[in-house]
Image: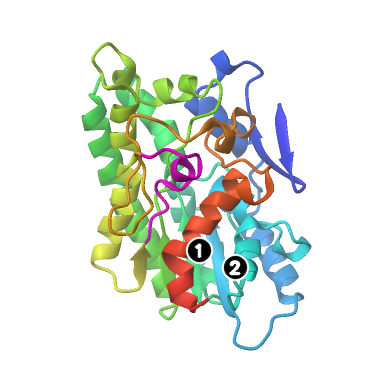
Amino acid sequence: MKLLFAGLTLASAAPYASEMTAKTLVNSLRESMPSDPMAHTMEILRAAEKAPVESGTKRILVVGDSWGTLTAVGSGIGVSFFERKLKEHSCPASSVSIAIPGTTTADWLGDWNGPMKVAAKLADYVWIVLMGNDALLEMPDCATLEKKSAAECGDKLFAEMTAALGKIVDDVHEANPNAKIVGFGYDTMFGGLGCRFVTSDMFPQCYKIGGGGNRCFNTEFLRIQETWDTVASNRSWVTNTSILGATQVAGGDAKASTDPASRHIDMDKMGPAKYWPDYLGCFHPGVFGGDNSGAMVVMEEFYKSFWAKELGC
């Protein structure tokens, strides 16, 4: 079924949970990718130019996958969860998203690289949210075709994503040396009804007898956060923040914490089902529930972990 949010196709899931596989979910998103990346991006930028912006307002460009689409598209009509949070906290910022559902790091190093560089020239900040689709597409084959262990697949993902993300942030920096880049490795997801079919497809090694279950899966999926930490470690223009634990804490899990001094998730659990519904493919935060929706919970944590101090709001 096609899932529509704010006039944008965000996901296309199989009709039955048992048919939900990592590749199926990502490829369904990729079906709606624009055929002309530059024309699509320029249309968005021209529309953004018409929106009134107060003097001193920082310009934020959102680059990446469907997380950037779901949380940050539509600020002009009041449906951007990201910008609603910034305005709620009186942050002097305005955002525009060129994120495309289904995209991988290869896309932003390929056809979408030029448009990204053009858009980056107009930004004070570039928020990049990527790598989830790379994991969804590559990890099943790593397990079933390459016959690697979960840890070996996690190592492969980390190595590939560190190189790819490093090149992407370097390209943004080349286009606009004054722009600050920020990113995080998502939150723990996949708690919705039927989402076990997705996680066991990505890392089937974890769900065999003695494989470690959710703890094993979370250990390897957190390599995406480690990628940001590594890329930022030797680039002064890149900040690695984290929203890990946001939805588990909001759901009352005492084993998770968003305390900056001790941030961690409950490794034996996924994100609460109410925040990670299967109707959005299991890996998008839910959009219903007002301030207690998955999207608003994760954007509040993003505000706390980065924008509050960065923008002084």
Q: Main secondary structure of the magenta part?
A: loop
Task: Examine the rendering and report whether any part of residue 290 can be seen.
Answer: yes
Residue 104 falls inside the magenta stretch: no
Specify the farthest residue to the top. 209
Task: Specify whether 27 is left or right of 183.
Answer: right
Task: Residue 252: give x, y in percent of width and height.
Answer: 47, 40
Q: Which residue is mark 1?
A: 303
Q: Which residue is mark 2?
A: 86
* Image vertical order of residue 51 relative to residue 17, above or below: below
Q: Residue at x 35, y 68 (%)?
A: 238
Marker disc for residue 227: none
Sequence-wise, the earlier of marks 2 and 1 is 2
How would you rate the neighbour count of disc 1 (Cα within 10 Å): few for under 14, some for 14-19, many for 20 or more? Answer: many
Q: Quadrant of residue 81?
A: bottom right
For the residue pair 175 and 243, the one nearer the viewer reads as 243
* Image vertical order of residue 52 relative to residue 41, above or below: below
For the residue pair 26 and 229, the one nearer the viewer reads as 229
Residue 247 falls inside the magenta stretch: yes
Instruction: Give the residues in magenta.
Output: 241-254
How would you rate the neighbour count of disc 2 (Cα within 10 Å): few for under 14, some for 14-19, many for 20 or more? Answer: many
Q: Residue at x 28, y 57 (%)?
A: 229
Give the distance between the C-alpha atoms of the residues marked 2 and 1, in whole angstroms. Answer: 7 Å
Disc 1 residue type?
A: Tyr
Number of marks drawn: 2
Task: Residue 175: give x, y in percent of width and height.
Answer: 45, 74
Specify the farthest residue to the bottom. 55
Q: Residue at x 68, y 84 (%)?
A: 54
